[in-house]
Amino acid sequence: MVSREQKRAAKQKKLQLLRSITNSHAHDKASIILDASNYIKDLKQRVEKLNQDVATAASFTSQNFPTIRVEEQENDFLIKVFTARNCQGLLVFILEAFEELGLEVLQARVSTSDSFHLEAIATRENKEAEDHIDTQVVKQVVLQGIQKWIEVSEQE
């Protein structure tokens, strides 16, 4: 038979293992178990968030993830964004991204019926600024706008 002392030692060992797994700093049994419960809830929330991210990524397969092309033309940029699906509200996020970068849209053509298609000519608002903006920077900012749109769309 297993002695009472061996059972107690085994229980203490399991509590210490649980304490170390959950990064608990508690010393009493009830607090360790409460910390473990909170840790499990946190893990469940993380799994739900990851599942949402996977679902969003799946909805944006390589076929319908926006295609972005940026060309430099003298002092302006020609920016083209296309996706096979309608992305309600995406234009607002892209325009906000332009604004954050200090780009002014001179001309734009947008279609959002069955797909999303943006063709815009933008220039720097402050042409005397020291910082250099190239096509890669513009493309990165557009991608950030798209990412913000995706995050907001997931929450709705």
Image: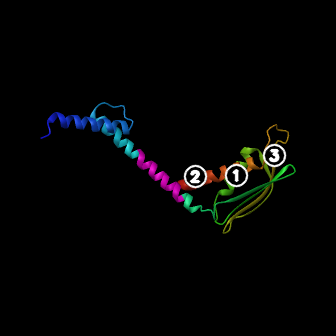
| Circles 3 and 2: CB atoms closer than 8 Å | no
Residue in the image at 52% along x and 59% along y: 55
Q: Quadrant of residue 13?
A: top left
Q: Position of residue 150 (x, y in %)?
A: 59, 54
Q: Which residue, as the protein is rendered here, is positioned at the far right?
A: 74
Residue in the image at 66% along x and 66% along y: 84
Residue in the image at 82% along x and 37% along y: 130
User: Label 1: which residue?
Assistant: 142
Q: Earlier in the sequence, mark 1 or mark 3?
A: 3
Which label is found at residue 151?
Answer: 2
Q: Earlier in the sequence, mark 3 or mark 2?
A: 3
Q: Which residue, as the protein is rendered here, is positioned at the far front?
A: 1
Specify whether residue 7 is painted magenta: no
Residue at mark 1 to residue at mark 3: CA–CA distance: 15 Å
Residue in the image at 37% along x and 45% along y: 40
Identity of the amino acid at label 2?
Answer: Glu
Local crowd size for mark 3, using a 10 Å CA cut-off: few (<14), some (14–19), many (≥20): some
Q: Give the magenta-colored segment's residue range.
A: 42-55
Image quarter of the N terminus: top left
Q: Quadrant of residue 70?
A: bottom right
Residue at mark 3 to residue at mark 2: CA–CA distance: 27 Å
Q: Position of residue 73 (x, y in %)?
A: 85, 53
Identity of the amino acid at label 3?
Answer: Arg
Q: Quadrant of residue 34?
A: top left
The local secondary structure at tag 1 comes to: helix
The local secondary structure at tag 2 comes to: helix
Q: Position of residue 39 (x, y in %)?
A: 39, 42
Q: Nearer the viewer, residue 37 or 97?
A: 37
Q: Main secondary structure of the magenta part?
A: helix
| Circles 1 and 2: CB atoms closer than 8 Å | no
